[in-house]
Amino acid sequence: MTFENVTVDSPVPAPGTVLVIGIPGSGKSTVAAALAARFERSAHIEVDALQELIVRGGHWPTPDGDPEADRQILLRARNACLLADSFRAAGFLPVVDDVVVRRSHLDHYRARLSDGPLHLVVLAPGPEKAWERNNAREKRLTTDWAPLDEAMRAELAGEGVWIDNAGQTVEETVAAVLDATGLGGLRSPR
């Protein structure tokens, strides 16, 4: 097999990047994976999985304000943007999921996603529903991140498409995302 005349980039890049955000337990990873599955060519970039690539020296976010954890939050966001841009240029719609509750974090994404529109989706089921979901899943967190909901609503009000998915199934939430972002016409036939 030879690769001399093979290019990675597609003649038709994907139409932007989808960024699915919310507090822990809001359904980001589940919805992002189900959303990506709706398209003929897509990639799900789970930012927590990028954090897990750090073998030694990793600092997960804490409510205590760890400067190294804050630096790594931006590192993993930068790496998510690099992957998203690469997939998009190759014709795959990138669907990124991350906990983003601060405007500065969102601005970090906006500054580093180089081409195409950013389709921002905020999953906002409320802190009680997020905590309930968190306790019902395998990837359980022991920290109550409810204060992040208040911060997200204060700092990101008016940004992107907000979906209260507290009473929705995953499929209902995906349908709402497709309708609200205008990406529904791009999905692959089922």
Image (tube, grey):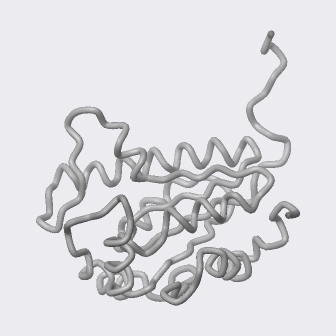
Count the marks: how many?
Answer: 0
Vertical position of residue 3 compared to residue 70: above or below:
above
Q: Quadrant of residue 149?
A: bottom left
Q: Is residue 86 left or right of residue 140?
A: right
Q: Is residue 138 left or right of residue 184?
A: left
In the image, what residue occupies the spot 60% across and 58% down? Answer: 95
Q: Quadrant of residue 9?
A: top right
In the image shown, does 107 or 43 lie closer to the viewer? 43
Residue 103 seen anywhere in this rendered image of the structure: no
Vertical position of residue 166 compared to residue 88: above or below:
below
Vertical position of residue 65 compared to residue 45: above or below:
below
In the image shown, does 67 or 128 lie closer to the viewer? 128
Looking at the picture, how far across and down is residue 47, in whole percent? 44, 53
Residue 58 seen anywhere in this rendered image of the structure: yes
Q: Quadrant of the C terminus?
A: bottom right
Q: Is residue 49 left or right of residue 167?
A: left
Looking at the picture, how far across and down is residue 171, in whole percent? 66, 75
In the image shown, does 138 or 162 lie closer to the viewer? 138
Looking at the picture, how far across and down is residue 77, in whole percent? 42, 53
Tell which residue pokes out farthest to the right in this image: 189
In the image, what residue occupies the spot 84% across and 48% down? Answer: 12
Q: Is residue 85 left or right of residue 68?
A: right
Q: Quadrant of the N terminus?
A: top right
In the image, what residue occupies the spot 61% across and 66% down? Answer: 118
Vertical position of residue 152 compared to residue 43: above or below:
below
Tell which residue pokes out farthest to the top in this image: 1
In the image, what residue occupies the spot 65% across and 81% down? Answer: 172
Q: Quadrant of residue 188?
A: bottom right
